[in-house]
Image (cartoon, helix red, strand yellow):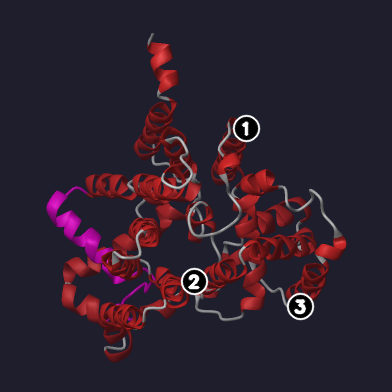
Amino acid sequence: MNLELIKKNYHITTFILLYFSIILGFIFDENTTSGPKFDFFNVLKQLSLFEENFKFTFLNYDKIETPTRISPIFIIIIFYLKKIFVDLDFVRFVLLNIILLNQIIFYKSLKIIFFKKLGINKKILFLISCIIFISPSLRANAIWPESAMLGLLFFNISLYYFLKFKENRERFLFFGLNIFFLAIAAYIRPSFAVFSIFFLFYLIFNIKNFKQVIFAILLNLTLAAPAFYYLFFLDVFFISSGVGGNELDFNYLSKIPIILSIVVFHAIPILYYKSFLIKNFVIRENYSILIFTIITSLILILNFKYNINFSGGGFFLHLSNFLFDSDYLFLTLIVFFVFISLKIVNLNFKSNLLIFLILILMVPQFSIYHKYYDPLLIILFFTIFNIGIKKDYFIKNNFIILYTFNIIYFMITLVNSYYLNY
């Protein structure tokens, strides 16, 4: 009877198992992606400075000892949580559970798209939302709290209200809430600010209500005003802070292949379902894409100068250097990354192209890490990134592939972190 009950509530069983695996990771200081624990102790350096002299540190954040690109708002959140809870490990545990709310918000967004419109079983949608608990980046950066995952929570809420607005365009309040929560996300993690371009473009080209567009622009500017004042008038330009190769670097020709490789990597289990890359492939129907792929790939290959010693670089670049001690395999795969990216864009040209541009623009620094896109990409794939997910996706085999792929990715990351250190 109990076994039958567990099978019937497979979605809750999955949630409980994955949630407690993260709690277990917290107890044993899981640091799957290597960097989060180090980054958290760097955060503590800034925290101690805020505790010594709050006003001076806030107004000289880019000039303090060991400057960082981490938003001072994130440090201030930890500062006040530590005042309330005192014990730092308890603060970590509180932030861990706050960050894990990403799953609930993601599930609520999935219900809007797939339950209300397609009638997909809620249990299945809940199961999909739990996939982010396997994300090495979410796990490690929740256990060792980091601004990217806390910012992701507010971005998720923003995305939820955007979907609510798409569902009911008469309720402009939802779009206002979308802007408000996106602003919070951007104050915690500045890179999320670029998504305002996507939401504003949707309003301009789909709603075409002049008053609403003006209101949305003014609300964005109003909410951004304190940040502009802090960065440009008080001249606390912490965003440029960095060490070695981590400073701002606008040579996107070196970074685009890395970003495309990470997008393609996380799209693999869904691309398998689509199989549009091979199935019924006809050259004459893909002629323009092939030509553009060749030209773009040559430009990217000839200008690729990514120093893997500065860390980051994504799965495929590390695999190339691990297997052959060179970038050659990765350079060969650039053609593949560009082609798949163009095919994805072609599924919904305007919307998908804009999201690709945003994903590229949101990382102005040199080093590109998976945590910038994981689990953000899986959330985007099932919400605003149109990659052709339809009702026939929601069958057992596709879930097995989705979970198997992410579990393997987690295990590879785990082995690399504790044994290979590559």
Q: Which residue is mark 2?
A: 362
- Whether 332 is drawn above or below 31: the answer is below
Looking at the image, is mark 1 or mark 3 nearer the viewer? 1
Does the CB distance between marks 1 and 3 fall below 8 Å? no
Instruction: Using the numbered discs, state the Cα–Cα distance from disc 2 to disc 1 in whole angstroms.
Output: 34 Å
Q: Secondary structure at mark 2?
A: loop
Q: Which mark is residue 397?
A: 1
Quarter of the image holding residue 162?
bottom left
| Type of amino acid at the residue the image marks with label 1 | Asn
Q: Secondary structure at mark 3?
A: helix
Q: Residue furthest top?
A: 1
Q: Residue at x 49, y 46 (%)?
A: 136
Q: Which residue is mark 3?
A: 299
The answer to whether residue 161 is visible is: yes
Magenta stretch: includes residue 18 = no
Q: Residue at x 76, y 50 (%)?
A: 323
Classify the position of the N terminus by image quarter: top left
Q: Locate residue 141 relative to residue 244 in the image: left or right.
A: left
Q: In the image, which residues are magenta?
A: 60-87
